[in-house]
Image (spheres, rainbow, N blue to C red):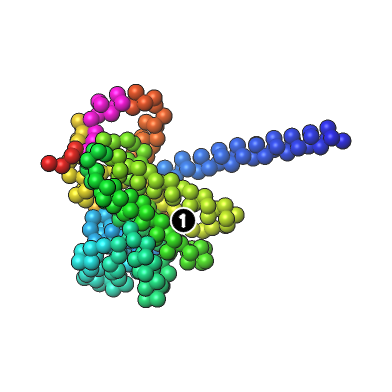
Amino acid sequence: MKTTISCNNTLLLLVEILFLILKVFYFICKNILTMFIPITKKSVTNEIVLVTGAGHGIGKEIAIGYALLGATVICCDINEETNKQTMKEIKLMEKNAVFAYQCNVADRKEVFRMAEKIRKEIGDVTILVNNAGIAFIKTLLNQSIDEVSRVIDVNLKSHYWTLQAFLPSMIEKNHGHIVAISSIVAFISTTHGTVYSPTKSAVKALMESLSEELRAYSKGKSLIKFTTVYPALVLTGIVKKPRSRFSFIINGLTPQKAASLIIDAQRQNFRERSIPSYWLLLVRLLRCLPTKAIHCISDFLDVGVDIED
């Protein structure tokens, strides 16, 4: 009797393993197909989109891009003047469903106060774009306590506060999309990135963990989407002295072009997307090499960021 039960259990386990292999193979093939077959872009009309760091650079262009697509846009930035300027530019395009809220996203209390005002005055945020970010291009030993804290607070902690403020309504309605702007340096170690790079790696881990958490607690029924974007060089002014032996490697994109690609990634439900798109595959292949091989390639290409004068 025990032998029969044991055989049955073994057979069931083998069947489970076979189904697992088939599922894995199916999803690998599906993922490969998306590289060649364009994915239909979902509509964002009538969605309520909140963009942090909307006062300048990528955040400003993301806000403009969503407004042009018919979404209700909420501009959020610590700089009230530039934030309102973004709103004014959108209104000049005859897009009136745009609002501006001054907020330091590194401050949890400010974020929750803003969230409450938004709920009362506009409604529940359905697309959250965590874009705000800062950097100080210095060696680790030259980073002050304040600089280290500010980078961690803005680049990482702010994600926790905005998620805690806006995710509950998404869970309640089982509808929403979280977009996090990380960086390609989340995968590649760089000189002068000892504070900035770890925050971007942490954003990657946060998005993966949260996505898995919702999947587990909803038993796979959560319809909330997650998109993490890894830009390479975008000409926002944060990096003033990029360096490369071959200029085409770090041919920077304009904020407008980067924003367009970020919005497309969200509308196509990409879980991860690099800008340009080929970088994600390249850096993952690079990470498979021995450390000394990576150093050889790095020295040959001489890619990095120099300290400002």
Decide which of 241, 112 is in the foreground and name it.
112
Q: Give the number of callouts.
A: 1
Which residue ends up furthest to the front in the rendered image? 145
Residue at 37 percent across and 69 percent down: it is 113
Give the extent of the magenta segment: 295-305
Name the spot of residue 247 as percent of width and height, x first. Answer: 19, 35
- Residue at coordinates 30% horizontally, 44% vertically from top-left? 196
Relative to residue 286, is residue 100 drawn left or right?
Answer: left
Residue corresponding to mark 1: 225
Report the front residue among 108 and 72: 108
What's the amino acid at mark 1? Answer: Lys
Residue 170 x %, y %: 48, 64
In front of the other: 69 or 306: 306
Is residue 126 part of the magenta span, yes or no?
no
In this view, 79 is above or below 25:
below
Kindly give the residue lying farthest to the right in the view shown.
1
